[in-house]
């Protein structure tokens, strides 16, 4: 079989649903179509617009195939999500939005059966951010649901099922603070049996395994050729990590940015993770535990910027540094190392220009990221993926605060799609030489270090 070059990637983030075509030779996106990841209000509860997504995915695949000739498919999605199917292979219940707070109403009951962090590496989180809490709430509040569930699927593999008809699940999604996985044992946690779902979990595959080929009806609907291969798929933050696992020696850390900022440390120091500060164990594409931390940095950026101009002058940057204009955590108090705190400013926010606000916000996000890196025992270079890789102030402050090399790889704005596409490459090229992206190293202004030290002192004193 000829090795694929153009890989169609279904890339579902919390904010947007994207279908991209990745050229494996250049490791870049050559075509992209997007739509908002719309949440339907209910009934029966807030849930994702699965059928709307599917219509968009099929139309987008057809259009992109006509433009670029797709040779294979892969999938990556946000975490904290599973799909429940009935005997006919349809949704047993709508797919719950993990930001719905319904599961909090049964938190005390759920905590009785929830495994300890020492078993799962999964911190206790609010709303539906623990998939176990979602499932517990659904099973308790939908009396007939337990009898209707035939299969539990991880989210990327649900779309693989829609494409191929093959049922599977995969460890990077189970390892995303679900409470369902025991990363050090490499198997399901005790919670799966306590929920009565042990015999309903879809068969496990590795992210880079071949799932199958597109169904005839999918080929007919999209114009894709029958026999087109589909990779099993991967959790989005692990998709960002995957290219670096193939090409970099440890130690290093990857900072994957978007709605969530996910920090993943490979080969770092041996540290005790603190689940109360939103640290966790992720599981990489090869099934290995990865010390990690997270906070909702993209959401925090949107809350503070409120659609204002996101540029600044050198004079405005100097004002922020010299006047110590600082934003303190936590803008979104539900996540991160400073969760539970209420954000504040060192000066009256109303007196700030848009540029000063943007600079201080960029510094704030970098300093929270630095704290996350410390908590995961990070060592070696730091690679920033996603939208924050475009933010020079974020990168320079991160380098100043950590004292370590900060780099961005070419194509870093599309890390999840490229990482997912490389799964297909590995299926066909198991001995493929490591690929190294061109990089640029950040050299920060020394004034930033003094600002970072002052910020941390204020945060620790509060």
Image: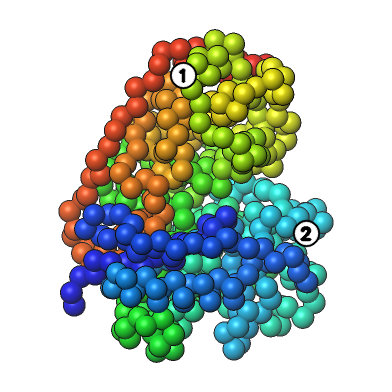
Q: Is residue 304 visible?
A: yes
* Quarter location, residue 197: bottom right
Q: How many marks?
A: 2
Of labels 2 and 1, earlier in sequence is 2
Q: Measuring from the top left, give residue 372's x and y in whole percent.
A: 52, 34
| Residue placed most toward the observer, 240 or 195 | 240
Could you tell me how far apart the alpha carbons at marks 2 and 1 are, in whole angstroms?
46 Å
* Image position of 359 with respect to 9: above or below: above
Residue under label 1: 314
Q: Which residue is mark 2?
A: 102
Give percent across and percent down for residue 370: 50, 29
Of residues 404 and 42, the one nearer the viewer is 42
Q: Residue at x 39, y 57 (%)?
A: 417
Label 1 neighbour load within 10 Å: few <14, some 14-19, many 20+:
few
Residue name at image x 40 percent, y 16 percent: 445
Mark toward the viewer: 2 or 1 = 1
The secondary element bearing badge 2 is classed as helix
Question: Quick one: quadrant of the N terminus?
Answer: bottom left
Q: Which image quadrant: the C terminus? A: top right
Q: Is residue 213 left or right of residue 170?
A: left
């Amino acid at each position: 079989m000829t090795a694929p070059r153009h890989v169609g990637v279904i890339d579902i983030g919390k904010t947007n649903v994207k279908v991209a075509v990745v050229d494996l030779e250049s490791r870049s996106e050559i075509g992209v179509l997007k739509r908002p990841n719309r949440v339907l209000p209910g009934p029966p509860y807030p849930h994702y617009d699965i059928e709307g997504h599917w219509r968009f995915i099929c139309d987008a695949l057809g259009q992109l195939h006509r433009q670029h000739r797709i040779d294979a498919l892969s999938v990556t999605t946000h975490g904290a999500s599973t799909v429940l199917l009935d005997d006919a292979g349809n949704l047993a219940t709508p797919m719950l939005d993990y930001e719905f707070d319904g599961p909090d109403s049964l938190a005390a009951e759920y905590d009785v059966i929830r495994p300890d962090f020492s078993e799962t590496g999964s911190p206790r989180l609010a709303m539906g951010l623990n998939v176990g809490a979602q499932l517990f709430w659904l099973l308790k509040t939908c009396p007939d649901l337990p009898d209707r569930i035939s299969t539990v699927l991880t989210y990327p593999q649900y779309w693989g099922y829609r494409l191929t008809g093959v049922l599977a699940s995969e460890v990077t999604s189970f390892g995303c603070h679900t409470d369902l996985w025991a990363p050090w044992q490499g198997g399901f946690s005790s919670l799966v049996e306590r929920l009565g779902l042990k015999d309903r979990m879809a068969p496990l595959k590795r992210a880079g395994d071949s799932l199958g080929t597109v169904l005839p009806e999918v080929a007919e609907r999209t114009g894709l050729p029958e026999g087109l291969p589909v990779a099993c798929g991967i959790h989005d933050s692990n998709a960002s990590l995957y290219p670096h696992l193939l090409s970099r020696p440890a130690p290093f850390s990857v900072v994957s940015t978007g709605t969530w900022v996910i920090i993943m440390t490979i080969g770092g120091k041996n540290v005790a993770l603190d689940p109360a500060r939103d640290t966790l164990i992720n599981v990489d594409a090869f099934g290995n535990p990865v010390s990690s931390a997270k906070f909702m940095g993209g959401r925090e950026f949107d809350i503070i910027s409120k659609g204002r101009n996101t540029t600044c002058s050198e004079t405005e940057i100097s004002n922020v540094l010299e006047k110590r204009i600082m934003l303190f955590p936590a803008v979104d108090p539900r996540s991160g190392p400073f969760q539970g705190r209420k954000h504040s400013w060192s000066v009256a926010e109303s007196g700030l220009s848009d540029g000063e606000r943007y600079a201080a916000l960029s510094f704030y996000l970098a300093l929270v990221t630095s704290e996350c890196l410390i908590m995961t025992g990070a060592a070696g270079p730091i690679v920033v993926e996603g939208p924050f890789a475009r933010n020079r102030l974020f990168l320079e402050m991160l380098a100043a605060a950590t004292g370590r090399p900060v780099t961005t790889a070419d194509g870093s704005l599309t890390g999840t799609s490229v990482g997912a596409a490389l799964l297909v490459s590995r299926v066909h090229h198991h001995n493929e030489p490591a690929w190294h992206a061109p990089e640029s190293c950040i050299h920060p202004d020394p004034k930033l270090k003094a600002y970072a030290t002052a910020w941390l002192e204020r945060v620790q004193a509060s």
